[in-house]
Image: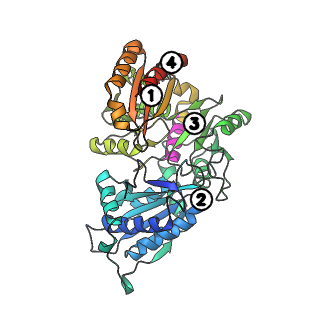
Amino acid sequence: MGRLFGTDGIRGLANADLSPELAMSVAVAAAHVLAEADRSHSPLAVVGRDPRASGEMLEAAVVAGLASAGATVIRVDVLPTPGVAFLTAESNADLGVVISASHNPMPDNGIKIFAAGGHKLPDAIEEQIEQMIANPASWRRPTGAGVGRVHDLVDGADHYVKHLVAATPVPLDGLKVVVDCANGAASTAAPEAYRQAGAEVVVLFDEPDGHNINDNCGSQHLDAIRAAVVSHGADLGIAHDGDADRCVAVDATGSIVDGDQIMAILALAMREAGTLTEDTLVATVMSNLGLRQALARESITMVETAVGDRYVLEALRARGLALGGEQSGHIVLPSHATTGDGLLTALHVMARMAKTRRSLADLASVMTKFPQVLVSVPVKDRAAAGSAESVQAAVRAAEQSLGSTGRVLLRPSGTEQLVRVMVEAPTADQAQSVADQVANAVRAL
């Protein structure tokens, strides 16, 4: 069996790559591994999903698998991924499971697993789960009263929204926000949280039907929300992805404010409040050079990780830091959440606007984004191609030509036979030209 887990759980075409049989096996194995240390009580699991149609089928399989392993299951129905993580921690559950493919199109689905406390799994635990899946003969199969029971939590979203509002630094009175819910898991929770926090809310794409999630809407498709912010005269827009663990913002002019700019805004706000531990931010290698320069000007340290919010989370936990995230809009605030939370992030951005009475564009101007070009080159062996001397020579030449005015990143894909070439430069034309030069060196192999 090949490795199932990617950088954010298991994901694939529902009922093909990700079948009910596989979902059940993953659930059984996760229950065994994550409840193995303490057999003094029946395992407790929280299960939620996004609204895509296949989620109903896969939820049934996951719940059956957990119950067959002896776990008591609390179903929370449709809820953002960070909401499931929050309820996993709040209920002292042994694990949480989310059925979602995040920003992927509707035919896909996925399984994300949280350990006790609502924390994402380290590689070693994922490997144990995969080994358990491959060895069903080792599964414990309780019978009679040992079989798990299933309960529905009807007010889980209310608990989550209450938590979000309590974590908002100041009331949002006077702000008008357009929110794009991506016809996803945030369709109820996001507008309600923003209203309860004090904002006037205009809602887009909040009518999920099982098939329209992420369909020309959400954080991957920003044309509609950019137009709506301008037409409604709103102060900002917030676009979520299908499971709302990320957000991208839009300022009053319709310009996009991405995760790097959001991190810059929050880092300065938290340093001012004395809550930015060690005056340090965690971000990935893909974060824009402009973020690095902005942080350096403000004497804020940046810790760099591999791509994937799980690696950001690991660095945050290892050093006890208070802020981290990705350019894509996965932002983590460990004082309030154990994983990326798009709703929480949006509330903190709006709170900064409300407190300072500054526009989002003004706040984001602390950082100047460098044009960034990403080229993906298919290869036969991504590791060999990335380390080839001819390719490394092309990278060195590119770095020399850019000097301190740009950046070159060569990164083999974690899941596909691709080498990704990322270049930042003062102009888009220069970035494209340099990226093409390095990409051509990879192609020449």
Magenta-colored stretch includes residue 264: no
Mark 2 against mark 1, which lies toward the viewer?
1
Query: Which image quarter holds the N terminus?
Result: bottom left
| Residue highlighted by disc 2 | 51
Q: Which residues are magenta?
A: 341-352
- Other residues around mark 1 within 10 Å, as few (<14) / some (14–19) / many (≥20): some
Q: Amino acid at mark 4?
A: Ser
The x, y position of residue 279, in whole percent, is 33, 31
Q: Main secondary structure of the magenta part?
A: helix
The residue nearer to you, when weighing 370 against 206, is 370
Give the CA distance from mark 2 to mark 4: 42 Å
Give the side of residue 410 with respect to residue 170, left or right: left
Mark 2 against mark 3, which lies toward the viewer?
2
* Secondary structure under the numbered disc 1 in the rendered image: helix
The x, y position of residue 156, in whole percent, is 52, 63
| Residue highlighted by disc 4 | 433
Specify which label sits upstream in the sequence, 4 or 3. Answer: 3
* Secondary structure under the numbered disc 3 in the rendered image: strand
- Other residues around mark 3 within 10 Å, as few (<14) / some (14–19) / many (≥20): many
| Residue highlighted by disc 1 | 443
Q: Amino acid at mark 1?
A: Arg
Task: Residue 425: tell me if it is visible.
Answer: yes
| Residue highlighted by disc 3 | 249
The residue nearer to you, when weighing 79 against 273, is 79
Give the CA distance from mark 2 to mark 1: 41 Å
Give the CA distance from mark 1 to mark 4: 15 Å
